[in-house]
Amino acid sequence: MFTEKHLDRYADVLLCGLKLARTGRFKKNDIVAIRYNVSAIRLAEILHAKLLDMGINPVQRMNHTSTMERNFFELSNHKQIVFQPPGEEELVRNLNGSIFLYAPESITHLGNIDPNKIGKAAVAKKYLRDILDRRDEEGLFGWTMCVFPTKELARHARLTMKEYSNQIVKACFLNRTSPVSHWQTILKNVTSIKKWLNSMKVNFYHIESENIDLEITQGDKRKWIGLSGHNIPSFEIFLSPDWRGTKGLYFANQPSYRSGNFVKNVRLEFKKGAVNKIEAQIGENFAKNQLSMDKGANKVGEFSLTDKRFSKINKFMANTLFDENYGGKYGNCHVALGSSYSDTYDGDPKGLTKELKKKLGFNDSALHWDLVNTEKKRVVANLASGKRVTIYENGKFTM
């Protein structure tokens, strides 16, 4: 449903995001991986050509088809589940960038797979992500990703292919002559909000909606970040809090597809920083398995807010990248269970060692699962001075 003009503009936006996502500058002969599902091959071809024109060395990797992925989990023995191909570690130790084009043929094909197998495979690959995280912190690596419309995504979102594609076109400003210029304008506005948020000395945030009564502790050496280029589109402003101070009730009224499983209406109760009770209308057993993946899986790694004035997304898209950036009537907040983002550290990321992360309450896990709430809400910052400041209400930051 995309024209060649849409695809060319999409590629330009992705490359803009990739450059923004890396603190160091790209230079000739850097290595950038293009990972894609087969349905997005035309966009991958356009990106491949643009990277070559920049003097970059593109490395292309097509993801497993849904049949391959299902076979992997159904047929693999223990050694095969944790097997990592020769050369994969060498590649990630030399990568300077990565672009992922998500265009799934199926999002439910792993629904009958043992969640423990899925968890073991994720944990086995975590050391590769740790390498990339360290390279990111050192300014040697940057990544971005996007969604390419498929019939499967449209079907689960209960939209036509035209409606689904149009949501992406509007959200990424591909209907504008210069979408990159429009992104830069939004970046300027978001930068002002981040500066305002980061000027406050906050002890904790109190989030209230019809079904949420939650306290999030900001923690020491934290900063709000957003529009980092990592996700296309991205309108959220977020931080990785000190997980140890999380307490209260959280509710995700937006459904979630994860590892082939559908989860709906997740309720979480936090006590002493960890989830001590979880319920879900659909997919409760899967959710409980995910939260037992490792020691950090039942703790918060991210807290995020999206301003409805920036996001044009107003429909459920059956994909977290879009759903966590939902604008609609009241914007959204989300918490992510699992790993923290080290770039929310307010200091030199090169000095953020594993020991310091633990001391500051940054969470570590193979899981990172965004759970979204789109209800009308208020977020109040409780400052160190004793003052209370409403920072978000009715879907907008109050600055």
Image: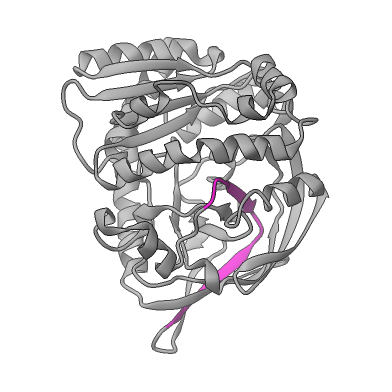
Q: Percent from the top left, x then y, of residue 98? A: 37, 29
- Residue at image position (28%, 29%) is 94
Q: Percent from the top left, x then y, of residue 288? A: 75, 51
Nearest to the observer: residue 138 or residue 346: 138
Q: Is residue 254 visible?
A: yes
Which region is colored magenta? 365-383
Q: Percent from the top left, x then y, of residue 244? A: 54, 71
* The quarter of the displayed image where residue 1 is located: top right
Q: Is residue 52 above or below residue 335?
A: above
> How is the model colour-coded?
one colour
Which residue is at the far left?
A: 28
- Residue at image position (49%, 32%) is 170
Q: Is residue 332 visible?
A: no
Nearest to the observer: residue 116 or residue 320: 116
Q: Main secondary structure of the magenta part?
A: strand
* The quarter of the displayed image where residue 70 is located: top right
Q: Percent from the top left, x then y, of residue 191? A: 31, 55
